[in-house]
């Protein structure tokens, strides 16, 4: 099955933060543990994009974030996986 090539979409930082607040409200439906993990993980992502203005929601950008978590933050593979899962769930919310 052929897949359509992803195209970058411009989202202002302000709009992204608004969407993030909506996502946090949506997380209230989850368990307190899941909610806390996702909130902490996404805080780290937003700290990173504050310094990485070139982030455009492309696979290569997520790879850069993963490299940051692994090399700069020195997180374990399990923690990196958790951070990326929370980011993937946020992305699913954005397109859902």
Image (cartoon, rainbow, N blue to C red):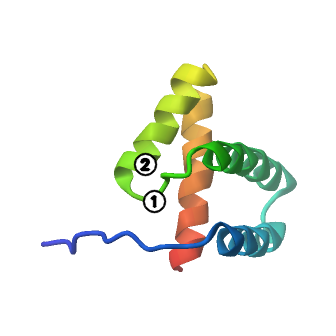
Q: Which mark is residue 44?
A: none
Residue matched to label 2: 61
How many marks on residues?
Answer: 2
Image coordinates of residue 83 in percent, x first then y, are 62, 42
Task: Give the image quarter of residue 52.
Answer: top right
Q: CA distance from mark 1 to mark 2?
A: 7 Å
Residue at x 53% of width, y 69% of height: 92
Task: Give the image quarter of residue 28.
Answer: bottom right
Q: Residues within 10 Å of mark 2 (few under 14, many from 20)?
A: some
Numbered disc 2: secondary structure: helix
Image coordinates of residue 44 in percent, x first then y, are 71, 42
Residue matched to label 1: 56
Instruction: Locate residue 36 relative to residue 93 in the image: left or right.
Output: right
Image coordinates of residue 17 in percent, x first then y, are 73, 67
| Residue 77 visible to an observer of this rendering | no
Instruction: Locate residue 60 relative to residue 56 in the image: left or right.
Output: left
Residue at x 30% of width, y 69% of height: 6
Q: Nearer the viewer, residue 42 or 77?
A: 42
Residue at x 21% of width, y 75% of height: 4
Image coordinates of residue 66 in percent, x first then y, are 49, 36
Q: Earlier in the sequence, mark 1 or mark 2?
A: 1
Q: Are marks 1 and 2 in contact (CB under 8 Å)?
A: yes
The quarter of the image holding the N terminus is bottom left
Relative to 12, say whether 84 is above or below: above
Q: Residues within 10 Å of mark 1 (few under 14, many from 20)?
A: some
Residue at x 61% of width, y 63% of height: 90
| Residue 91 visible to an observer of this rendering | yes
């Amino acid at each position: 099955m052929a897949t359509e090539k992803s195209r970058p979409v411009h989202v202002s930082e302000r709009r992204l933060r608004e969407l993030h607040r909506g996502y946090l409200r949506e997380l209230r439906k989850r368990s307190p543990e899941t909610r806390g993990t996702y909130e902490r993980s996404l805080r780290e992502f937003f700290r990173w994009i504050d310094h990485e203005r070139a982030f455009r929601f492309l696979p290569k950008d997520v790879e850069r974030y993963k490299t940051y978590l692994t090399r700069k933050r020195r997180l374990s593979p399990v923690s990196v996986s958790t951070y990326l899962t929370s980011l993937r769930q946020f992305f699913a919310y954005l397109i859902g």
